[in-house]
Image: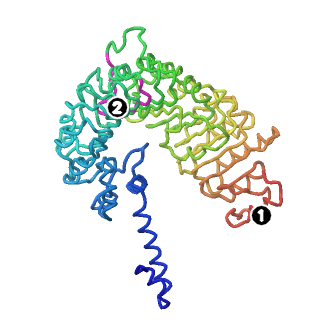
Amino acid sequence: MDTGGEVALKHEDVDPLDVAVLKQRQNFRSLVCSSSFEILQHIFHSYVGIDETHGFPLNLRNHRIPLPALLSQVCTRWREACLSDCRLWSCIPFGLNQKWASEFVARSGESSLEISSFLDANPLPLALVRGVMHRIRRLRVVGNLDELQDFCDAIANKPAPVLEYLFFRGYAAYNSNILMLHIPSTIFVHVAPRLRSAIVPQAHLEGFPMPAFTHLTSIHLYILTASDTVRLLQNSPHLKELHCNTIRDCPLESTPNLLVEGERVHAPELTTLVIRNIKLAGVISFFEALDAPSLSELTLKCIEIKEEDVQRYATALPRVLSAHIKTLHHVQSPCDELKIDGDNSEYSTVECCSTGSGEERTEIWRDSGHASASHLYLRWIATGGNGAFDTQSFLASLLRAFSAHDVRILNLRDRHGHLGRSSGCLQAFPCVTLLHYSRSDTKEACRWDIFEAMTPMEQRIHTGQTSLLGGQTLFPLLTKLVIHDSFIPQFGGVFLRVLRRLAQSRKHDGQLLEIAFEECSYSAHVMAELKKDAVITWNGAWCPPFSFGGIGEDPELENWEMWGSMFDEP
């Protein structure tokens, strides 16, 4: 006997579209009914977002009902498939209410759990978390520091035998005196053998040893004293990444007898060390004793330098960092790119990395806050009773710690045109062939010392500032100059005179200097004059060595690409 569907298909008056829809429904029913539980569960895991490597989804994706529950309500077979898969219920995401959280725990059987909770919105009951602490594999908790401290204290006396990942994110509550989270040394009653990563950026560790953190490979903390840094590395010999964010009121401190004379701090697996807001007195002895043969990234942000300490640390910091810089170069590769953000006032930065090939990482230059791609990132703050002061001697001493002949690419962010005063220390890099230069000063009558220092002494135009420059020529092997994000005077002024003389000096030596302007204010006069003695590009557009439009030409109006195809474009 024909089924109703078959009869409908044979009826000659049936709309073809209806027939197609009916066939599609039949195929779908067949797939749903015939697929094994294993296939259905694999599909469900993909839909819910379960990932074996990176864990579970962090929130409900704006669904009022959790996705596993939605799937279980489609049909009887899907419900059976969902309820028989404990892993499908083993994630309690941010935003799940208490009723559903309890249901998930019950349906997850004995599977390991991932729990995420906002303490100020639908917080999970502490009794629920404490009761399953032995099953939690990944734990994320976010809330104000008062609530977060209560949560931490509540689970501190519970073992965490399968915990692999711990994340606590806190913020100061209104009218609260609690500014950081205190993690006791006895957390998890010393039992967390699988814990490898702890991200607790607002936390302070309350003493050592801390057995639960023994097997850590990565940790992000709020504050460590210099002494605590040593104890943590001794407590966690497998630590690979150490990030410590401090606050100005609680800097790294100088601790008497931090190390016994001759004692070494062994960190054989440490690859990444990132510390912020540092008082140098507390870390000089630490870096002097640190033995980290695997170190591949070192970031020191906001090093506090007082005026009376400049000379002292100008000698001490390069001395203790030199061995670690050699390690960075050995583990990664020789540093052929150096970035210097020379403010000559409050903030200054030195950044070192390897490019691998040419300009493939030029975009890094545009992000002044970028440090993660660098071998070494140093940023210091000059503080004093009367505000900022000159730290050029500190910069000069610091640059001596680098392998000068390896540096081929140099990035200079010269905020106020004062880096020319540092030409003496920049002469330590004679092999630079590519210079990226940027300045934020918008005054037409500003200084261009750095370009004059790159011109041979006898060919300089002597702008009145030459007394600050040395007699040697800066970057004698330079082949390309890239000027970024800088104000270009409309009629050139001193800028044009100095830069053109530089181009003429290189041309006189038999080599045309390539000058590229990137995101700079356009000046037709500057372009027309410079291209007489150099190869010029403006925002990537090549400019031919002649002009049809005279002084009024504009690369946005003329078809430079067409002319580049007709002539030998450099």
Query: Which residue sits at x=47%, y=88%?
Result: 11
Judging depth in this view, the residue of 387 and 290 nearest the camera is 290
Q: Classify 114 as above or below 44.
A: above
Query: Which residue sits at x=64%, y=37%?
Result: 356
Query: Disc number at residue 562?
Result: 1
Instruction: Give, as a three-letter code, the residue at label 1.
Output: Met
The residue beneath circle 2 is 195
Q: Quadrant of residue 202?
A: top left
Q: Quadrant of the N terminus?
A: bottom left
- Our reading of the magenta stretch's main secondary structure is loop
Counting from the top left corner in percent of width and height, residue 453 is at 66, 35
Judging depth in this view, the residue of 90 and 523 nearest the camera is 90
Query: Which residue sits at x=62%, y=47%?
Result: 483
Q: Classify 395 as above or below 80.
A: above
Q: Is residue 195 magenta?
A: no
The residues colored magenta run: 238-255
- Secondary structure, mark 2, is loop
